[in-house]
Amino acid sequence: MLKKLQNLAYNPLFIAGLLILVTCIITAQSLLLEPGVNPETGCVDTHYNNYLIFKKSFFHLIENKDIYLEFKNEQMDYYKYSPAFSLLMAPMSILPDAAGLLIWNLLNCLLLFFAIWNLPPGDKKGRLIMIAVIFIELITSVQNSQSNGLIAGFILFAFIFLEKKQYFLAALAVVLTVYIKIFGLVSLALFLFYPGRLRSFLYALFWIVLLAVLPLCVVPYSQLIYLYRSWLDLLMYDHSISWGLSVAGWLHIWFPFSPKNIVLIAGIFMFFLPFLKYRFSGNLKFRLYFLSSVLIWMIIFNHKAESPTYIIAITGAAVWFASQEIKVENLVLLVLALLLTSLSPTELFPEYLREHYVLPYDLKVLPCVLIWLKITYDLLFFRNEKPPDKEILLTKH
């Protein structure tokens, strides 16, 4: 009986089926819950507002409108992504909300799942650990109909393609994250550990240009230039007013004198420190650690990070934890992340602690910061733990 359960747990189709079921339930809940109404504008505030923002951006795009306006009577927030992403939303935008939302949520959930299931070295136990670690945070992201599952999944697939020396596809995966959320640029650093780095950057440049001009299929050149200027203005404004659930925001609460830009510069410096150990880049574990660092860094140093965004950071923590033998200090950090980062926004967490400690002091951020510091330490003090002939090494290029 135990053997059958174990075989079932190791069956990707079974786990994918469970995730599909959970996603369908969450989607149905989002559609059936009573929406609110904005008293100022009369706009209906659904429980899948983020999806509606993405969907309506496509119609605003083909109507030659400035997609970065507020549209108070239609949606509850600004659209903050690229014109290309608006166009790529077309297949779901033309569908009824129920069908489009379900496809959108399934896409975010299943892309991340299959990316995890295909990560090297292919250890089934490690895969299950990663799925278990991200599960609660993934639910939070899907409940908010966010795009963060897609971003985490694309970055993992970029890593997978790089490992297989499929640099053209790796570049596409990275660039797609950039055109969803600009902080995906950080994942370009992954290219530096592979012999096809120059080719990968050239491929990335190709995809950047192609996706940049893709909206010309539906808008004139002058309108597209206007949209990119409007997008840049919105991003700059957001940076000036936002702290987010980030290192800068957390430090600002604890130490109000901490300047945002200095924190970012320090973060960039620490992010690149592991390149001092570049000689270990042939070791798969080292590359997995760096992948984890990328996933966490892009969130904890993001001035617009919010609770659903942390599926990306938790994915990084899961990859880091599952790519090594269990150590007490790592287990403590992971449990802290599960409690404060993943569980704290849910009803499973004591409301008093959440309202009086977690939210006022941005404690959701803290475990991911500690894990990222531990990953940076692990990278800086990395050493080969096995003889070369037993190491999991990248195939000689």
Image (spheres, helix red, strand yellow):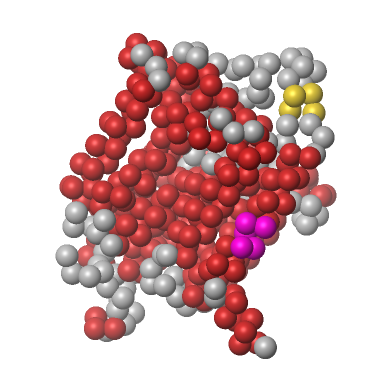
Q: Nearer the viewer, residue 63 or 186?
A: 63
Q: Nearer the viewer, residue 185 or 164?
A: 164
Q: Nearer the viewer, residue 260 or 348?
A: 348
Is residue 213 left or right of 54 when viewed as pictured? Answer: left
Give the residue displayed 80% in from the left and 28% down from the top. Answer: 36
Is residue 4 left or right of 204 when viewed as pictured? Answer: right
In this picture, is 264 found above or below 366?
Answer: above
Residue 313's x, y, as percent? 52, 52
Q: Is residue 280 visible?
A: yes
Secondary structure mostly seen in the magenta stretch: helix
Is residue 220 left or right of 202 when viewed as pictured? Answer: right
Residue 307's x, y, as percent? 62, 44
Image quarter in which the C terminus is found: bottom left
Residue 317's x, y, as percent? 51, 60
Quarter of the figure with residue 392: bottom left
Give the residue displayed 53% in from the left and 18% down from the top. Answer: 60
Give the residue displayed 52% in from the left and 59% down from the top. Answer: 113
In this picture, is 223 found above or below 357?
Answer: above
Image quarter in which the N terminus is found: bottom right
In this picture, is 286 found above or below 252?
Answer: below
Q: Is residue 317 visible?
A: no
In this picture, is 324 found above or below 173?
Answer: below
Residue 42 highlighted magenta (yes or no) = no
Give the residue displayed 39% in from the left and 17% down from the top. Answer: 219
Quarter of the figure with residue 70: top right
Q: Which residues are magenta?
A: 17-21
Residue 190's x, y, as percent? 31, 52
Q: How many marks?
A: 0
Question: Which residue is the extreme one toward the top?
Answer: 222
